[in-house]
Image (cartoon, rainbow, N blue to C red):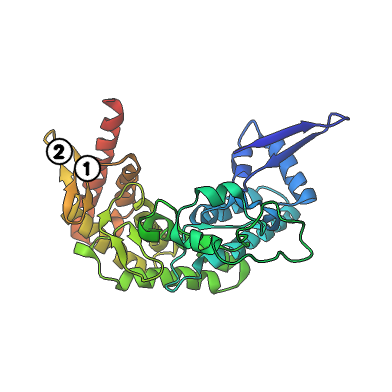
Amino acid sequence: MRVWRHRGQHQDERFVVTRPEDLVSLHLHPYRTICRKCVRMSKLHGMDYHRTPLGTSTAPYRDVWRVGLANMAARRHTERQTSMFKQKVLELGEKLLPAFSTPTGIPRGVINLGSPFLDPYVYTTATSASFQAHAKAPCQNPPAQNPPPQAPCPNPLWSGTSWSWGWASAGSSILAEFGTLHLEFIHLTELSGNPIYTEKVMNIRKLLDKIEKPHGLYPNFLSPVSGNWVQHHVSLGGLGDSFYEYLIKSYLMSDKTDEEAKRMYYSALEAIEANLVQKSPGGLTYVAEWRGGVLDHKMGHLACFSGGMVGIGADDGVPEKRQHYLDLAAEITHTCHESYSRS
């Protein structure tokens, strides 16, 4: 988060908040006064996603969190200010939709929200095949109403262009990213009345539900073109983590009516227990990673959320396993505590 402070000639302060979710942080004491000023300045000068520089291209899964967080901030302000926040999150949601324009409907990892002119840094550092293919296309002239290009050809990346992370295997999309959109996109439909947001995430879920899964596990890399797994690396740590928690959260936040999410969650948990949950020689329970059938006996820091995940889902499991889930949640959490206390 960056808050830029400028004292003008008359000692008036202006604050620029770089992301909507920063307003939530600023509302915490002692920054509430700053937060109120940010809201007023946002209303006066606008949070204009249409004028975002290309160099600030973003990941859709990160920005959907901003949808919910900005609405949290909005609830603490006047009706007029709340309307402004709602307008902005709906603009943001609409700007993210082109990322889903793939043969499978699985979104790519990065989308340009900003101006239609090429950012030299982005062009020279991006390596994914989809990005380079677009960049090498014939040059296009910018619309006459736009200012002169800020960088020479090759081809500008127009707002709405999406591409995969350069480090992602074979141009794949990441499970923890495209699998962590469901709750916020459902909320966007509720806010806008437009079913397209729900349709986008339901398409993702249906594809994941029907695709063949090795030993019932969900690998971390999926091709947005073919809809097939790119490599069989499974992890409850980075690259996979939040997908699983969103399944159980979707069930709970639907007032326990989303039976599809419930079924997928407990099926995945069963596969995780059968293939990944291990016990160390010292008696610590941990969740290993899985690489093409070979266990990698490590538990990443980000996998520590799984203790809480198993815990919140315990009461809705089959009756004979509810206590088992609580015990498993406690064991995983204890392991994570020990990883800190012993280091």
Reading the image, the residue beneath label 1 is: 286
Is residue 175 found left or right of 10 in the rendered image? left
Whole-angstrom CA distance, mark 2 to mark 1, is 7 Å
Q: Is residue 116 visible?
A: yes
Residue 280: mark in rendering = 2
Which residue ends up furthest to the right in the rendered image? 10
Relative vertical location of residue 56 with respect to residue 342 in this rendering, above or below: below
Q: Is residue 36 visible?
A: no
Q: Quadrant of the N terminus?
A: top right
49 or 337: which is nearer to us? 49
How busy is the neighbourhood of tag 2: few (under 14 within 10 Å), some, or many (20 plus)? few
- Mark 1 or mark 2, which is nearer the start of the sequence? 2
32 or 121: which is nearer to us? 121
How busy is the neighbourhood of tag 1: few (under 14 within 10 Å), some, or many (20 plus)? many
Residue at the (32%, 55%) spot, across then down: 313
Residue at the (44%, 65%) spot, across then down: 254
User: Where does residue 144 sit, x and y in percent of width and height?
Assistant: 78, 65
Amino acid found under the numbered disc labelled 2: Ser
Q: Tag 2, which secondary structure?
A: loop
Residue 262 image-quadrant placement = bottom left
Residue 104 image-quadrant placement = bottom left
247 or 297: which is nearer to us? 297
User: Where does residue 56 sit, x and y in percent of width and height?
Assistant: 60, 49
Figure disc tally:
2
Residue at the (74%, 48%) spot, across then down: 42
22 or 319: which is nearer to us? 22
